[in-house]
Image (cartoon, grey):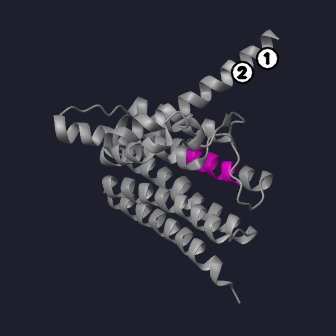
């Protein structure tokens, strides 16, 4: 008999997987906007299941594995199918569409396998070795979201196949790298606690623009810190 406290976080995790599934079906149907938003909603569920588990003290190895399998669908396979579907419309790189989208999916799954090997289910949230997979999905989705809203609102086409491919491959490489990535709350710790809620509300209100900016900032801060620390070590 499953204890009641485990039902809520696992149900939210299942919702995460369902949103990933819906994203895949939307990408196949060619509705890229819906596919992106389903992945973004999956990120919300991914954050909520952890918070719910912490609140209920409902951590388990099953929950950890279940979360990773669902993340593999929503943040690994769904963005890979989105990448495939978007790039498949470009005749210039038709021969590279499958390798590029598969590399992203492969690196995402490998990232989750590594995470499961080196961590145990607990209420503590440590820094990451390599970029977390939701951030990888955010790179793909936020860029497409940004160029879509700029095109719709200002009539400017900022989409570049080369840029999109580059961002996808960079995200894949960072996920399987050993570069330490701090948790988002640490990266944005410079924001006073009393200003955190207004900051989040501003981000949500301007998500179509701000998601790409915030994602890039998160990645750059971690990369700069890594290379700065490495340079100091080499000098010493």
The answer to which of 179 and 222 lies nearer the viewer is: 222
Compared with residue 226, is residue 175 higher up or lower down, i.e. above or below?
below
Find numbered disc 1 in the image and state the secondary structure of the residue it sits on: helix
Taking the spot 71% from the left edge, 21% from the top edge, the residue there is 229
Taking the spot 19% from the left edge, 42% from the top edge, the residue there is 152
The answer, for residue 87, to whether it is visible in the render is: no
The answer, for residue 161, to whether it is visible in the render is: yes
Instruction: Tell me, for residue 229, which label it has, or none.
Output: 2
Q: Position of residue 197 (x, y in %)?
A: 42, 48
Q: What crowding class fits label 1: few (fewer than 14 Cα within 10 Å), some (14-19), or many (20 or more)? A: few
The answer to which of 70 and 13 lies nearer the viewer is: 13
Compared with residue 148, is residue 51 higher up or lower down, i.e. above or below?
below
Q: CA distance from mark 1 to mark 2?
A: 6 Å
Taking the spot 67% from the left edge, 21% from the top edge, the residue there is 227
The answer to which of 65 and 181 lies nearer the viewer is: 181
Find numbered disc 2 in the image and state the secondary structure of the residue it sits on: helix
Q: Residue lying furthest front in this view?
A: 194
Q: What crowding class fits label 2: few (fewer than 14 Cα within 10 Å), some (14-19), or many (20 or more)? A: few
Indicate the quadrant where residue 223 lies: top right
Q: Main secondary structure of the magenta part?
A: helix
Q: Position of residue 24 (x, y in %)?
A: 44, 61
Q: Residue lying furthest right in this view?
A: 236
Quarter of the picture containing the C terminus is top right
From the image, tell me which residue sits under label 1. Answer: 233
Membership of 60 in magenta stretch: no
Q: Position of residue 70 (x, y in %)?
A: 58, 64
> Disc 1 vs disc 2: Cβ atoms closer than 8 Å?
yes
Residues drawn in magenta = 102-112
């Amino acid at each position: 008999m499953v204890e009641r406290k485990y039902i809520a976080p696992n149900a939210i995790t299942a919702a995460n997987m369902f949103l990933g599934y819906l994203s895949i079906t939307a990408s196949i149907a060619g509705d890229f906007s819906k596919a992106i938003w389903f992945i973004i909603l999956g990120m919300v569920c991914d954050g909520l299941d952890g918070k719910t588990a912490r609140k209920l003290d409902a951590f388990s190895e099953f929950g950890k594995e279940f979360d990773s399998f669902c993340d593999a669908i929503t943040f690994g396979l769904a963005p890979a199918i989105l990448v495939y579907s978007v790039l498949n419309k470009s005749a210039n790189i038709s021969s590279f569409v499958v390798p590029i989208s598969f590399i992203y999916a492969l690196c995402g799954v490998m990232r989750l396998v590594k995470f499961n090997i080196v961590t145990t289910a607990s209420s503590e949230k440590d820094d990451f070795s390599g970029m977390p997979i939701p951030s990888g999905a955010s790179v793909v989705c936020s860029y497409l979201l940004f160029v879509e809203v700029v095109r719709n609102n200002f009539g400017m086409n900022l989409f570049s196949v080369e840029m999109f491919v580059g961002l996808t491959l960079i995200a894949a490489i960072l996920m399987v790298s050993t570069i330490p990535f701090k948790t988002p709350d640490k990266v944005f710790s410079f924001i006073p606690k009393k200003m955190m809620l207004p900051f989040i509300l501003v981000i949500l209100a301007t998500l179509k623009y701000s998601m790409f900016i915030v994602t890039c900032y998160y990645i750059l801060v971690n990369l700069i810190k890594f290379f700065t620390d490495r340079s100091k070590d080499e000098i010493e």
